[in-house]
Image (cartoon, helix red, strand yellow):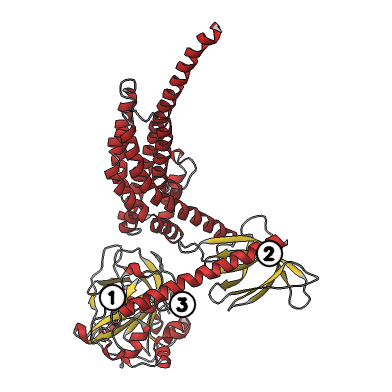
């Protein structure tokens, strides 16, 4: 009995010490993880960011793109390295007399707005990294060189960029654990509780970004599995379900092995590719969710079958079991329902907006300023219904009707009376009404873009390769053509055999500057109009002068009637033909 009584008090003291030790361990873990986090911030800010800015300042790519990728990482790094980490270091040294962390973390609250800005731009930043890595060799080279360093730990830039997004949920987790161990009468209780409330709100936004990042990672994996041939890596795409399936042949009902990827807006029907390396599947058909129907079928010889009927194709599929069949039907039907619900909401929003705000009537188009639909009121183009994203399909407003449309649907200009007859960006529908073009006439007007470069070049006023730069973007090689049938417009192709022009420049009204940009580009010239700046460089002074002769006429609205019937190229002279020219 006496032994039991003697053992009780040491056990109580041991339990109390253990709880205090747990609180100390949590605080110490916060300090250790903060040190590691500051190292990661320094890697992003002082290494990746600075090195890429140095390369941008050499003219390899716009510095603005680098700033968009790293957002306010320098401010976040400064706060943690110069304030929060030193405060935690000092507190752990004083833990014996001041065992608390809630008061320090509560000071974090005003700075959480910095994280809000970083998380808000995170999706766009990841997409920019992907696109610039694919398209700009200098960007890719700098990033890969840094990723080889030991400090990167064999992890990618994208992985390190996720660190600030993950950090706030980490604070939340440690604080919750700390509060569970903290006595309710502790002097640190109120501060710790307030800190948790504030941090939890910010963590919900970070968790959303983490889920989006995980979805993007999965999309990248699928992109590689499909041989990098399907353009699926887009924040608006969401993987719903994937798995093996059998397809019943139409003629002999034999079963063939297939693989399905179900997204929120499409179904990819794939054939396995038997390869030890590289892609695993070939996409046979892409079936849109819009208009898709699911029908349960019954086949005595082949059980567990169902039919997917879409605008593009109808598929007779066989699942591995009745449960697998039910899961596929359920996933497909729910995806279809969600798709229609999103589009119905979109249509209702437009209808409601039309009720609340009178639209410009057809008769008033161009004569009265429209009410612009706000950017945040729509997620997809109001004409072609394609989803918007930050890089390849951005929002534009039609100046005639006020609708939010993508660049493809706003690639038109018309004179608007309410704006003093100025040429303004409008959608296709408004362009046809204001200009009086019929749909068939519009096709004729746009048809030159669809004509093969070789055909246009063979009937041109002048054509050759030129180096081209728009504003501060990198120089790139372009096959440039001014066709006889459209002598006031310069068409640019990626190569002489391309079937579609990449861009056009209506030359009328441009100012020509024929002074060379630098000693490195002695045969360069520049076209400017308002904020538009287009720079070109020829391989020789002779070729430059041939282009300028035609362009000087075009910018004043004159056509080169007096020129030869043959395109103006160096072929007109007895010099050897050069590859860079027609």
Point out the tag, 1 or 3, that comes first from the N-terminus: 1
Horizontal relation, residue 144 to residue 404: left or right: right
Tell me the tag on residue 325.
Answer: 2
Q: Residue furthest right?
A: 301
Regarding residue 83, the answer to whether it shows in the image is yes
**The C terminus, quarter of image:** bottom left
* Distance (Cα) linking label 2 and label 1: 47 Å
Tags 3 and 2 touching, CB below 8 Å: no
Q: Which element carries disc 2, helix, strand or loop? A: helix
Point out the tag, 2 or 1, that comes first from the N-terminus: 2
Residue at figure coordinates x 32%, y 39% from the top left: 194
Q: Which residue is mark 3?
A: 496
Q: Residue furthest top?
A: 2
* Distance (Cα) linking label 1 and label 3: 41 Å
Give neighbour class at mark 2: few <14, some 14-19, many 20+ (Cα, 10 Å): many
Q: Which residue is mark 1?
A: 372
């Amino acid at each position: 009995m006496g032994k039991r009584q003697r053992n009780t008090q040491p056990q109580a003291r041991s339990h109390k010490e253990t709880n205090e030790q747990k609180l100390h361990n949590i605080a110490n873990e916060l300090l250790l993880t903060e040190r590691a986090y500051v190292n990661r911030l320094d890697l992003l800010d002082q290494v990746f960011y600075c090195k890429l800015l140095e390369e941008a300042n050499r003219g390899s790519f716009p510095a603005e793109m680098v700033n968009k990728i790293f957002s306010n990482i320098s401010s976040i790094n400064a706060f943690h390295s110069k304030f929060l980490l030193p405060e935690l270091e000092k507190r752990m040294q004083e833990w014996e007399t001041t065992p608390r962390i809630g008061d320090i973390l509560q000071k974090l609250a005003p700075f959480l707005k910095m994280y809000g800005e970083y998380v808000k731009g995170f999706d766009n930043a990841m997409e920019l990294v992907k696109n610039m890595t694919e398209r700009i060799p200098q960007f890719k080279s700098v990033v890969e060189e840094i990723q080889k360093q030991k400090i990167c730990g064999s992890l990618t830039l994208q992985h390190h960029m996720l660190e600030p997004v993950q950090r706030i949920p980490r604070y939340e987790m440690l604080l919750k654990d700390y509060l569970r161990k903290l006595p309710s009468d502790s002097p640190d209780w109120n501060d710790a509780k307030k800190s948790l409330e504030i941090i939890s709100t910010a963590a919900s936004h970070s968790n959303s970004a983490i889920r989006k990042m995980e979805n993007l990672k999965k999309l990248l994996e699928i992109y590689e599995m499909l041989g990098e041939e399907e353009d699926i890596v887009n924040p608006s795409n969401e993987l719903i379900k994937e798995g093996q399936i059998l397809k019943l042949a139409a003629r002999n009902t034999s079963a063939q092995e297939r693989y399905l990827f179900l997204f929120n807006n499409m179904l990819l029907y794939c054939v396995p590719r038997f390869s030890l390396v590289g892609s695993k599947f070939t996409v046979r058909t892409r079936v849109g969710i819009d208009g898709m129907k699911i029908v349960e079928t019954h086949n005595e010889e082949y059980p567990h079958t169902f039919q997917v009927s879409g605008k593009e194709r109808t598929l007779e599929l066989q699942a591995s079991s009745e449960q697998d069949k039910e899961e596929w039907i359920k996933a497909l039907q729910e995806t279809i329902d969600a798709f229609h619900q999103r589009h119905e909401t979109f249509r209702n929003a437009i209808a409601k907006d039309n009720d609340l705000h009178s639209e410009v009537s057809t008769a008033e188009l161009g004569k009265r300023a429209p009410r612009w639909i706000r950017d945040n009121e729509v997620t997809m183009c109001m004409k072609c219904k394609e989803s918007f994203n930050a890089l390849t399909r951005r929002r534009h407003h039609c100046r005639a009707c006020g609708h939010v449309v993508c660049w493809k649907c706003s690639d038109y200009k018309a004179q608007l009376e309410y704006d003093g007859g100025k040429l303004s960006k409008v959608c296709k529908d408004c362009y046809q009404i204001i200009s009086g073009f019929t749909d068939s006439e519009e096709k004729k007007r746009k048809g030159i873009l669809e004509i093969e470069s070789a055909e246009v070049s063979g009937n041109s006023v002048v054509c050759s390769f030129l180096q081209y730069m728009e504003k501060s973007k990198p120089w790139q090689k372009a096959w440039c053509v001014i066709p006889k049938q459209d002598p006031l417009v310069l068409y640019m192709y990626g190569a002489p055999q391309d079937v579609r022009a990449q861009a056009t420049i209506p030359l009328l009204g441009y100012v020509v500057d024929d002074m060379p940009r630098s000693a490195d580009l002695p045969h360069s010239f520049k076209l400017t109009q308002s904020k538009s700046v287009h720079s070109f460089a020829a391989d020789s002074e002779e070729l430059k002068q041939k282009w300028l002769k035609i362009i000087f006429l075009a910018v004043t609205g004159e056509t080169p009637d007096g020129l030869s019937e043959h395109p103006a190229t160096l072929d007109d002279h007895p010099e050897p033909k050069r590859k860079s020219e027609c």
